């Protein structure tokens, strides 16, 4: 089945006859008839019933047109999209990330600073495995993740298997994110024991993901009794503000989250390293390089 065959079927239905459609398409009537017949044979259906008074769509033909016209509209959109601008003028960039507000802040500034009338930007806040897969398959130019002493050995092996490399930006300590009204918000630091009465937010990963893909900076011998599995940063912030829940993270709070939330370090835990991943031996585009600069700005602010 080809787009040309679908176009011919659509035109025949609009014109009400093969001969009128052939004139509209500047092809011969036998030619258009042969293409439709070959499509009917390929799909094992009858599209039109021919009679002395004209043609009638069958139920199968009507369903084919319903699906085919959607394909034709998409094909027209794709053609228009790629012919409507000078490729040298359009800016294009995509990033995938674990759930970090500073990545969103960097993305917002990137959008504001792009000096062109044509651009396509994409941000995907998602599971760790999807971040890695998106960069490996070049759906995203770079991804933002962290590594720790606990995860580094296994994570670096996964990155190596996907032909990816990790670029460090900043070392920091594990923190909890909590509401500024939380009972622990005024502490200089917290311990694992301090966290026991409160619900722990865990960002949902796919069922077959290894434990070291967790975003909660897995800590040795830490198994919270109260767990909230969440997939969205916005919901996570709501739970922190309204339910005394906490999230274990990097300690980096970008605005506007810093207006309502606090970050308190967890005592006695090893460093973690924030960074970005990309394909090995692959130069970043200028827009991706600029985005990395913005990431560093918001991480180190």
Image (spheres, rainbow, N blue to C red):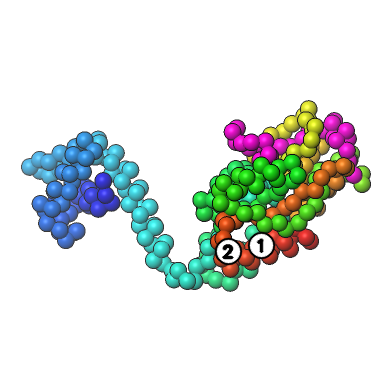
Outermost residue on the top side: it is 225
Q: Position of residue 276 (x, y in %)?
A: 66, 55
Is residue 179 visible to us here? no
Rendered image: mark on residue 292? 1
The location of residue 195, given as percent across then percent down, is 85, 35
Which structural element holds mark 2? loop
The answer, for residue 145, to whether it is visible in the render is yes
The residue sitting at 38% across, 62% down in the picture is: 80
Q: CA distance from mark 2 to mark 1?
A: 10 Å
Residue contact at pointers 2 and 1, CB within 8 angstroms: yes
| Residue 174 against residue 83 in the figure, above or below | above
- Disc nearest the viewer among 2 and 1: 2
Question: How many other residues sit within 10 Å of disc 2, few (<14), some (14-19) or many (≥20)?
Answer: some
Q: Is residue 55 left or right of residue 247?
A: left
Question: What residue appears at the point 66 percent right and 42 percent down from the top-left corner?
Answer: 154
Image point (32%, 43%), residue name: 66
Residue closest to the eye, 101 or 286: 286
Q: Which residue is mark 2?
A: 284
Residue at point 80% right, 32% down?
221
Q: Which of the two labelled residues, at mark 2 and mark 1, occupies the earlier sequence position? A: 2
Q: Residues within 10 Å of mark 1 (few under 14, many from 20)?
A: some
Magenta residues span 189-214
The one nearer the camera, 139 or 10, is 139
Q: List x then y, in percent, for residue 2.
A: 26, 49
Q: Does residue 200 show up magenta in the picture?
A: yes
Does 212 appear in magenta?
Answer: yes
Label 1 residue SS = helix
């Amino acid at each position: 089945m080809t787009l040309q065959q679908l176009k011919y079927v659509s035109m025949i239905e609009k014109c009400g006859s093969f001969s009128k459609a052939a004139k509209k398409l500047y092809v011969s009537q036998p030619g258009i008839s042969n293409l439709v017949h070959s499509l009917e044979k390929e799909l094992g259906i009858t599209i039109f019933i021919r009679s002395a008074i004209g043609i009638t769509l069958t139920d199968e033909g009507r369903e084919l047109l319903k699906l085919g016209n959607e394909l034709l509209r998409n094909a027209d959109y794709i053609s228009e999209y790629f012919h409507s601008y000078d490729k040298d003028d359009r800016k294009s960039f995509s990033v995938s990330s674990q759930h970090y507000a500073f990545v969103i802040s960097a993305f917002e500034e990137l959008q504001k600073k792009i000096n062109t009338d044509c651009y396509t930007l994409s941000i995907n806040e998602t599971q760790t495995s999807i971040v890695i897969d998106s960069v490996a398959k070049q759906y995203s130019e770079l991804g933002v993740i962290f590594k720790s002493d606990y995860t580094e050995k296994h994570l670096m092996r996964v990155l190596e298997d996907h032909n990816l490399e990790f670029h460090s930006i900043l070392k920091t300590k594990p923190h909890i994110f909590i509401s500024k009204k939380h009972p622990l918000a005024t502490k200089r630091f917290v311990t694992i024991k301090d966290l026991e009465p409160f619900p722990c937010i865990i960002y949902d990963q796919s069922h077959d993901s290894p434990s070291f893909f967790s975003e909660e900076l897995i800590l040795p011998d830490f198994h919270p009794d109260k767990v909230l599995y969440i997939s969205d940063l916005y919901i996570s912030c709501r739970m922190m503000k309204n339910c005394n829940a906490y999230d274990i993270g990097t300690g980096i709070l970008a605005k506007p989250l810093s207006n309502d939330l606090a970050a308190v370090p967890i005592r006695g835990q090893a460093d973690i390293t924030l960074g970005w991943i990309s394909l090995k031996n692959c130069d970043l585009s200028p827009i991706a390089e600029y985005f990395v600069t913005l990431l560093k700005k918001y991480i180190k602010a």
